[in-house]
Image (cartoon, rainbow, N blue to C red):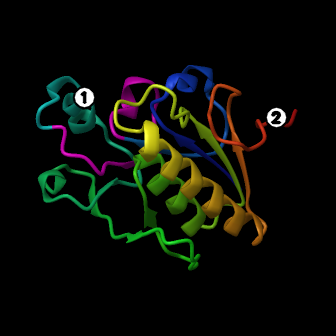
Amino acid sequence: MICHVLGLGESIKDFKEYEGYRIGVNDIYRHTYCDRVIVVNNFAKLPERKYYIDSCRPLDGLWSHLSCWQFHPEYRKLSFQAWNGVYKSKTVFSSKSSPFVALTMACSLGFTEIVLWGVDMNTHKDIKDKTKVVELNNFATFIAEIEKRGVRVFKGSEVSSLKILVWQKKT
């Protein structure tokens, strides 16, 4: 079972309408439909981005831990634990970015092949310097843990800073 995790980095432009389940973050609907959307930020001061989140109607819900989203018609309560390097099955973890939460949710849902699109960490205004180092390490340690359990994780493009293989679509 394949899941495409869709972030908003520059490599999201490389995502095509591939088959598989889609978990997107924030205002991903600017680019494409997703089955499930993760929102861990408020966006009150970013009305254009908030508009796309307010307008989206993902079939499997808009998942957030923030009460500001509880009036969204597809709202589902998101619970997660901070990633501390110890894997627990069926658990959603958090780190410094929404795509990390989405990756861990895909794993908790049982997907065995996960492709990360727009999860680049090259131009994010908050993921830089020491925070970028921490986030890349958290991705690396989480991916190493789930790969021990038979889950394969790829990046969708070489643009990503993640040190994992680029996905090759099976034909």
The image quarter in which residue 156 lies: top right
Q: Main secondary structure of the magenta part?
A: loop
Q: Position of residue 57 (x, y in %)?
A: 32, 42
Residue 150 shows in the view: yes
**Disc marking residue 49:** 1
* Residue type marked 1: Arg
From the viewer's side, name the closer residue of 154 and 33: 154
Q: Residues within 10 Å of mark 2 (few under 14, many from 20)?
A: few
The image quarter in which residue 116 lies: top right
From the viewer's side, name the closer residue of 66 and 139: 139
From the viewer's side, name the closer residue of 92 and 141: 141
Q: Earlier in the sequence, mark 2 or mark 1?
A: 1
Q: Position of residue 110 (x, y in %)?
A: 63, 67
Q: Is residue 28 above or below residue 38?
A: above
- Name the residue located 53 percent from the left edge and 32 percent from the top edge: 118
Residue 69 lies within the magenta run: no
- Name the residue located 27 percent from the left edge and 30 percent from the top edge: 52
Tell me the magenta residue range.
26-43
* Residue type marked 2: Gln
Q: Residue furthest right?
A: 171
